[in-house]
């Protein structure tokens, strides 16, 4: 743990040094202030403030003392003047597909084009596509000692992570990638994409045995299509889909889970229908009764009594 902390600290200091001359402002410490509150106020970090003022871990800051506080010397152009490109909507396009193609998000697309949720995309309409163009301007890239220290610190850090197998004594076991990317956020994005693609097929015709050609589906070809569009391959039939993936209890259902039913006369006890859970006790499915892809309440007596199992493919 100590070794990992030391390497992270070295990496931070090396990064600061590599940025060249730092612009500073003076800050008089007020009553009740801490390094953390001062750093937040000036949009910087405790490490940078400590380094600039020669403070060590555990040093007490005193009321009335003047601190040098660094100010960010770079401009993130994406935050100030985001670049936009234009895209002509084609047949079959969805916001999710367009977002993935241009390496952006559905939320950013809606914001850039003032689109409401569930708003239909019109073929031929121009969309503004925000481009992530975050740039950081450093001092001249010379092979200084600071740069060499930065490379060495990164190399040592990688070696330590591999040797430690991502374990830190004081905080249990975690993946180092969790510092930068939340697994929960990844799962949330995947669920949103599944639901977004599923809803693009609302109203499409139900035909028993249809495989998706000419926009016609039966219940299991509909779910297979949606998951395939998200890079997940699942079996073709509802009975086989009900045995695929992770078992999920009914009270632990999450958006994007597959839910299965026995809609046969007399409750024969086997799975013959499938849908995708949307949250709020609702699901989307290609309904033989409704003759189309539709959204239905799981609270309806018919489906509630015929619920069999749920699975979470991944």
Image: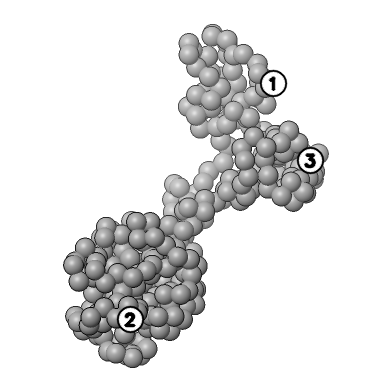
Report the front residue among 1 and 108: 1
Q: Earlier in the sequence, mark 1 or mark 2?
A: 1
**Residue of label 2:** 272
Query: Can you say which quadrant of the picture contains the N terminus?
Result: top right
Question: Local crowd at mark 3 within 10 Å, few (<14), some, or many (≥20)?
Answer: some
Examine the rendered structure and indicate whether residue 129 appears above or below residue 41: below
**Residue 178 on image: x %, y %:** 58, 48
Quarter-wise, where is residue 156 in the image? top right
**Residue of label 1:** 56
Q: How is the image coloured?
A: one colour
What separation in Å lies between label 1 and label 3 (alpha carbons)? 20 Å
Report the front residue among 6 and 227: 227
Report if residue 102 is visible in the image: no
**Residue 20 on image: x %, y %:** 69, 37
Q: Earlier in the sequence, mark 3 or mark 2?
A: 3
Examine the rendered structure and indicate whether residue 9 appears above or below residue 262: above
**Residue 246 on image: x %, y %:** 48, 66
């Amino acid at each position: 743990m100590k070794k990992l902390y030391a390497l992270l600290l070295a990496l931070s200091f090396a990064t600061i040094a590599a940025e060249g001359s730092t612009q500073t402002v003076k800050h008089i410490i007020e009553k009740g202030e801490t390094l953390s509150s001062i750093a937040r106020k000036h949009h910087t970090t405790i490490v940078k403030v400590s380094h600039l003022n020669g403070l060590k871990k555990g040093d007490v800051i005193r009321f009335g003392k003047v601190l040098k506080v660094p100010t960010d010397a770079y401009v993130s152009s994406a935050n100030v003047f985001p670049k936009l490109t234009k895209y002509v909507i084609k047949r079959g396009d969805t916001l999710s597909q367009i977002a993935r193609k241009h390496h952006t998000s559905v939320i950013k697309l809606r914001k850039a084009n003032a689109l409401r949720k569930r708003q239909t995309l019109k073929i031929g309409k121009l969309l503004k596509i925000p481009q992530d163009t975050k740039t950081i301007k450093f001092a001249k890239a010379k092979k200084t000692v600071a740069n060499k220290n930065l490379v060495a610190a990164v190399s040592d850090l990688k070696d330590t992570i591999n040797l430690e197998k991502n374990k830190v004594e004081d905080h249990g076991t975690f993946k180092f990638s969790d510092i930068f990317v939340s697994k929960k956020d990844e799962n949330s994005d995947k669920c949103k994409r599944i639901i977004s693609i599923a809803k693009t097929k609302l109203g499409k015709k139900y035909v028993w045995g249809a495989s998706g050609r000419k926009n016609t589906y039966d219940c299991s070809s509909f779910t297979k299509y949606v998951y395939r569009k998200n890079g997940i391959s699942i079996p073709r039939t509802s009975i086989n889909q009900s045995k695929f993936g992770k078992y999920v209890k009914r009270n632990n259902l999450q958006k994007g889970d597959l839910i299965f039913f026995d809609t046969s006369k007399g409750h024969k006890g086997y799975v013959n229908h499938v849908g995708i859970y949307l949250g709020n006790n609702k699901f989307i499915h290609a309904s033989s009764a409704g003759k189309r892809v539709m959204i239905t309440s799981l609270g309806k007596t018919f489906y509630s009594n015929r619920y069999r199992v749920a699975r979470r493919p991944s």
